[in-house]
Amino acid sequence: MPEKFTGMLADFGAADLALAGGKGANLGELVRHGFPVPAGFVVTTAAYATLLAETGLGAELEGLLEAENAGARIRALFAESHVPACVTADIAAAYAALGGGPVAVRSSATAEDLPGAAFAGQQDTFLNVVGEQAVTRAVVECWASLWTDRAIAYRQRQGINAREVSIAVVVQDMVPADTAGVLFSANPVTGERGEIVVDASPGLGEAVVSGRVTPEHYVLDRSGRTKSFIPGAHEVVIRALAGGGTRESAGTGSRQAALGTGQLAELARLAIRAQDHFGRPQDMEWAITGGRLYVLQSRPMTALPPQPLHLNPFQRLMGPFFLEMFQERPYPLDVSGWMQRGILAMLHGMAGSVGVVFPSVNDLLPEEDGVVVRLVPPVPHPTLRTLGAPVSVVRRARRFNPTRWTRDSRFATFLENVRRLNAQDPRTLAWRGVIGLAEDAFATMRGITELRISYLPGAFLPQAKLRLMLMLLGKRHLGPALIAGAETRTSQANRALEALADQVRSHGTLARAFTELEPGELLSRLEHDPEFKEFHAQFQAFLAEYGHRETVSVLLSSSPTWSDAPEVVLGLVTSMMGERRPAADQTGQALAELKRHPALRIAALRRHLLSAVDAAKAGTAFREDSHFYATMVLPPLRRALSELGRRLWDAGVLADAADVQHLRFEELAGMDDGGALPAAERERYRRLVLARAAKRRELEGIPLLDTATLFAHMRPAPGTLVSGMPASRGQATGTVRIIRGPDEFRLLRSGEVLVCPYTNPSWTPLFQRAAAVVVDAGGIASHAAIVAREYGIPAVMATGSGTRDLQTGQLVLVDGTRGQVTAAAAEPSS
């Protein structure tokens, strides 16, 4: 219909988004399938384009798009413009065909009512418009509302190019509603798909959608039966006036429900029909007049939480460990690349070695529209092969001693493969060569997988043996402390950071720079100030040795390493400049207590038990160090993926090279040359990236795993502020310092209680200054717990809400033995 500027709603469907806009396309789809939609027509985007072309407004608009605060000037241009006669004639004819009575005139932009971008309220609606001239004027004002400040800002946040957006207008018979409101075909707060939520109020629905009234609130089951009801306040009522326009008056204040049982059931049926038709939960506006129900709008629900999880005891046990690693939502490239082909492949290999099937990445991280929506704690499934696992485990434990794993020829091969990866410059390679470099990185990671399969039995069996012996001696509580303190690459890195902090403390000018400058300024000063040349050289040497460590999670190739984010390391050094707190020797104390046990007077038993302690410590060191070496694959992999993003950005596929993270690895590998894609392919991938980015933004406020679900079974003891899993024994008093991420490391001061959402090895240098550690996620075998025991500071893990319930500056007592945090009245302990 490009030759026409209007068309009846039934002329449009889901495929006509570019012509009818989101609202018009959705309403046309409903009309075609028999939904009770008020009669109406669409003023198409062709009419808008004609106005821009024939009045010269388009050229002026193009010149204003780059200007600051352009919205007001653009809207003024629309107000001053004269609509071409051919457009006004079509609008007049369509309005006459509709009956010429009162109508609602609603904006319908091409970027609204889409999955991930509702544009709710961003463009204007005009109710009870009467007369041909008034309708045309309302259409122009709808066009102008495409350029309100709020709409411009919303599009910018959604990454939508202002030059590509257009607008249609929907004109419908006005429904003089007795009652109106909105409904959701799923619960927008809990995500429960078995519930339908209805908000209603007397009069026009504008009072509900604008927030002018506290509506009646119904939660229905899928049959329309009421599960809960909250009466409305009925503060105001908005009604249509006979000659056009609306009037707002005070409400009755009645607490009586406006909707009957039959009406609620009909609303539920419409919600389910619309959801089934569009294939996703719907956000709908509706109105009732004279007992008849009308649908005024239907669009996909945005920011809808996933269906609530019901965790079994095993999932609740393992959930904190996985939650600690998934503090950020993985990108599609994370999931399909490093995770699926690297880390999760390692977990599948280790589980398979004992006949256990580990859940697939799709089960662990289900997606919607190509974006991860949630984390489902895995439940590994044993098979018949598991029956033979004990023999295999014992055989490997005898053959592969964790104290000698770095002498294994496979480890030497792994290091050589890493060296070879680092020697390749992806900028010099063809597209297929860069893909091959990434695939070589995944293959190199298999070297660590094979070593872990071989040596982990020799790490875990001694720990199991030690726990059994301690249980028989009545000293089970000593186990975690006894195996802490193993020499690892992490402890070596922490000592190296301590040496850097010592050097800063001893150099007055350098110390002032660290305390007074922001991280970016400090980094620049170190690079260019000759006075800091010696320290900068040592800092670079540190990054060369340890810079491949992850900052956020070993699972995310999208997150920077220490070398990529050196300001994070500088933040650690800043934090470590404070007074060094003497560490309690938890391992020594536990060993002394164990040796005092009467049974250890038997020399053979004493020898056997102390040998088990050493073997268990060696197992802990293997686990930590194999993690350390696995991260050596990240830098060359990140360089390869970044180069792919750079080429796609250079080709105009991506708005930013970092947007490559929104693509899947198999999509990148399927391109012969991303820098020379045909125009249609460039556009397809560009729109795919925009859609996934919008979906990701939509989910920003929704956690991957709701801690309320994970820790619902835990009830804090009376008087506690937060409680969790005891992870490192002892008590300490200090003021809270909430650190939410690596960029805040420098804020921790010596003697403060570190409260954080998660930890990984990058966080552990902070423990040398913290009085205690309180973590939302994790468990007693996490890096945080192990290192806390090494430094002899109390630690409470898996609180679920420490960062929410505690506040920076609050004086608390942390009891790592009981797993509790309480308010403290005394001054912080020195």
Image: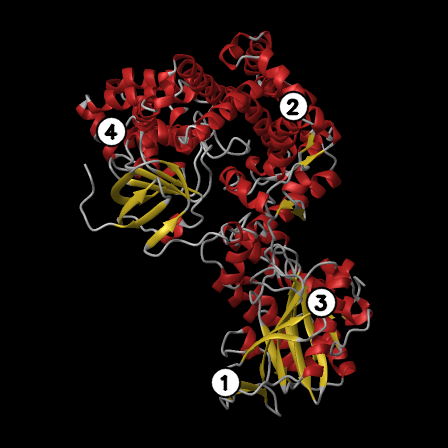
Q: Could you tell me how far apart the alpha carbons at marks 3 and 2 are, in whole angstroms?
A: 64 Å
Q: Evaluate if marks 3 and 1 touch, with contact meaning CB atoms under 8 Å apart.
A: no
Above or below, 386 against 694 in this view is above
Q: State which tag comes first along the sequence, 1 or 4.
A: 1
Q: Which residue is mark 2?
A: 390
Give, as a three-letter code, the residue at label 4: Met
Give, as a three-letter code, the residue at label 1: Val
Q: State which tag comes first along the sequence, 2 or 4.
A: 2
Q: Secondary structure at mark 1?
A: strand
**Image quadrant where residue 277 sits:** bottom right
Q: State which tag comes first along the sequence, 4 or 3.
A: 3
Q: Residue at x 80, y 64 (%)?
A: 3
Residue 336 rendering spot, x and y as whole percentages? 65, 34
Q: Is residue 786 visible?
A: no
Compare residues 21 and 608 and report the one nearer the observer: 608
Q: Residue at x 47, y 17 (%)?
A: 615
Nearer to us of marks 4 and 3 is: 4
Q: Evaluate if marks 4 and 3 touch, with contact meaning CB atoms under 8 Å apart.
A: no
The image's mark for residue 24 is 3
The image's mark for residue 563 is none
Nearer to us of marks 3 and 2 is: 2
Mark 1, Cα crowd under 10 Å, few <14 / some 14-19 / many 20+, is many
Above or below, 258 against 566 in this view is below
Q: Which residue is mark 1?
A: 236
Q: Could you tell me how far apart the alpha carbons at marks 1 and 4 are, in whole angstroms?
A: 61 Å
Q: Which residue is mark 4?
A: 577
Q: Could you tell me how far apart the alpha carbons at marks 3 and 1 are, in whole angstroms?
A: 29 Å
